[in-house]
Amino acid sequence: MFSTALFFALVSSVLAQNNDWTKPCLDGECFYDLPAASGVSGTMRVWGAPTAISDVTTAAGWTILGCDPTALKQDIRLVCTGDAANCDHLFQGAGAVNTLVRLPQNCGANAFARVARSWVHEDQSIPANLKRRLARRQDETGAAPVVQALALDTDFAAADPANGEVNIAIAGTNVPGQEGNLTVTPPPAAPARRSRHQRRGLFGFIEDQFKKFNSFDKSVTKSLPPLDIDKKLPVFSQSISCPAPAVSAAVSIDVEAKAHAVVSLGMTAVGTVIPPKMTAFGVFAGLDADLTGTMTFTGSASGSVDSGLIPVFEQGIPGLDFPGLLTIGPTFKIGVQGVANLDVQANAVVTLDYTIDGAKLFFPPADSVQSGGSFTPGNSPLSLSVSPDVSSKAVLTGHVIPSLDLGVSALGGIGQATVSLTLDAQASATLSLDGSATAGVSTGSAASASGSVNGCIDVGAGLDVNAGASADFFGLFNPSTKVNLF
């Protein structure tokens, strides 16, 4: 409950960046902001004992001699070219091993890594430009520079917390220009008998943040890059032929799907990196969409047909990525499904048209803010043509199913789950016909016939919404956790 809400306490409409690459992280606290070029906003804060967190950037006096900018696990060479006291900080306490270190921007895919091993590198070569600078320093101190080596990774489960625990708090959103501000420090861990009071206190503090978020200017989120879809494709086709007597029958379903959708998202997490554990987590997803699905049923056979869910569109959305620590990768999908119970030769076109406005998912669910939104079905026209002397109880149903999957990976992959929001919009036509000649009927125009058709066509529309998770995530939610939107 409280973990979902925490996002709104940490991400507000006017925020300032916290990270400063010119200042070393040597006092037990360090920040990292997602770069503006990523098109998203996010801030991470780590804190703990001064011996548990260190820094190998130039601000702390280190120069790295070669580093893979995309790797999460690698060995690096480095030499102290700045203040010796700052460099020595890396080796305080129980030593460099199992210390969480801040990395330079051009070193590694991650901002922070665990030191798995530390040693004096066998290759003591130094680039000429550094040699000249270090030569002057050697003349002053009399000590030759030593090239150190660090093995870096994100295997936080292997870390011995001898240097102390490392806490982490993260907040982010895909709305650009909303840089994270972790000025609110979660309460320190409380004894078991007081933990409920701790949670209630934090929850009470953030209720005002909920209200602030819910009054957020909708024009900001609706200005995000939209997803536009316009596709035609066959969904189902099956035929059967009998040689004697010569007869054939077939059923086919075709679909045209159109959509215009805008997705906003945000997340927050609080826990410890060493040892790896998330103690609070919340994710938000917003959806505004206009969707139209037109299904054409063509049948000359009796029986039941179900196409199953057919994917027609899938596209990734810029997510929130703090590599090795917490990543949310969203994917927007659209699937279609056609179901028909046929008892006559009939051709029908069923159109599904609806608008989703301001849909909001807060996961896991929270009492102080409600998931919800508005679902407005449009006109669902039906056109139908049937064969002579028809009597029918056929039922035709078309589904257009958009979904948003939020893949979550935390703390080196120790915690993984997918939070999914699925909206199954359907339109159906139930026929109750008794005819004596070839006839055609449409809900959008007058009937035409050479005889007569008696009966009625019941056209309906509906929406089923499911929001849940694929796996247990640090005991904070699991597949039994559900949220209702509509």
Image (tube, rainbow, N blue to C red):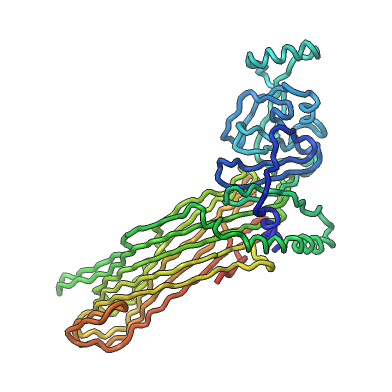
Left or right: residue 234 versus residue 228 is left
> In the figure, 168 relative to 244: above or below?
above
Rendered location of residue 410, percent (x, y): 64, 49
Left or right: residue 38 versus residue 274 is left
Left or right: residue 399 versus residue 364 is left
Could you say which is closer to the camera, residue 256 or residue 153? 256
> In the figure, 267 relative to 372: above or below?
above
> In the figure, 156 relative to 240: above or below?
above
Q: Kindly indicate the quadrant of the structure image that contains residue 8.
A: bottom right
User: Is residue 363 visible from the viewing direction of this image?
Assistant: no
Q: Tally the marks.
A: 0
User: Is residue 62 visible from the viewing direction of this image?
Assistant: yes
Rendered location of residue 107, percent (x, y): 62, 32
Could you say which is closer to the camera, residue 95 or residue 364? 364
> In the displayed image of the protein, which residue is found farthest to the top?
139
Q: Residue at coordinates 68% horizontally, 14% vertically from top-left?
A: 131
Rendered location of residue 370, percent (x, y): 63, 68
Rendered location of residue 301, percent (x, y): 26, 74
Could you say which is closer to the camera, residue 470 or residue 57? 57
- Quadrant of the image for the N terminus? bottom right
Q: Kindly indicate the quadrant of the structure image that contains residue 48.
A: top right
Left or right: residue 271 versus residue 426 is right
